[in-house]
Image (cartoon, rainbow, N blue to C red):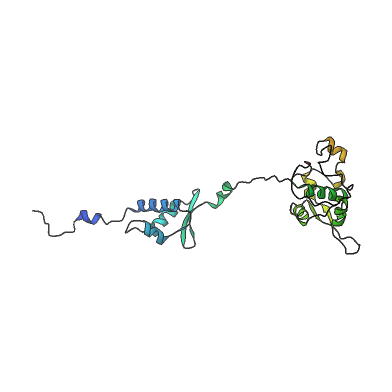
Amino acid sequence: MEDFSNPDTEGSDSLFEAPPMAEQERMVEAVLFASTEPVTIRDLEARMPHGCNPGEALEYLRKRYEGRGVRVVRVGEAWAIRTAPDLGFLMQKEIVETRKLSRAAIETLAIIAYHQPVTRAEIEEIRGVSVSRGTIDQLLEMEWIRLGRRRMTPGRPVTFVVTPVFLDHFGLESARDLPGLKELRAAGLLESRPPPGSFPLGQGSEERGDDDEAGDQPELFES
């Protein structure tokens, strides 16, 4: 005869048993994989069934991922799945961004290249307009020009010269190898006629604003 005096049977105990450790590993793996932020042990405990041991499951999972393309790593007090450090280069993508120089920058660069060393005042005299700080800063940032020696004149103004980076970009050994205007037009690098509203360098007498916006412009000195 069966004994029904004890209500706690083997079948009822199994209802409250924690899942096998292998299943707990899968749970932890799923949570870490889907989370955009590192996950704490407390977060895992709140998500996993009662009786689970997320700390132990994490340790097993961490060992299983050793030597793989991704790793289980600790981030402060939390855990996350991250790319193995030696494979980080695969996640990088270099993009070459082509930026056109404004007409003002092209004219300023050309004046510096053909008249170096040249001061800002001399650049403005040749262009017939003032040179904005942004134009000079852009050329300095590109490392196409640099500061030269100060002039031994009142105020000791700085001069500007082109850099080896500029020469290397255009395949020049020195500024003496710069082509003349006829050669530039023959090679199609300069328009035969100046754009509307412009005039040859050094031949303008009217004051005009510094044109810093890129528009229709010669292809010479495109970055």
Q: Nearer the viewer, residue 180 or 55?
A: 180
Give above or below for 117 relative to 217. Answer: below
Residue 145 appears at what percent x and percent y? 80, 52
* Left or right of 45, for residue 109: right
| Residue furthest to the left | 1
Q: Nearer the viewer, residue 87 or 216?
A: 216
Give the quadrant of residue 96.
top right
Residue 62 appears at what percent x and percent y? 44, 54
Residue 117 visible within the image: no
Q: Nearer the viewer, residue 212 or 223?
A: 212
Give the quadrant of residue 51.
bottom left
The quadrant of the picture occupied by the C terminus is top right
* Left or right of 90, for residue 72: left
Residue 188 appears at what percent x and percent y? 81, 36
Residue located 39% across and 50% down the image: 26
| Residue furthest to the right | 153
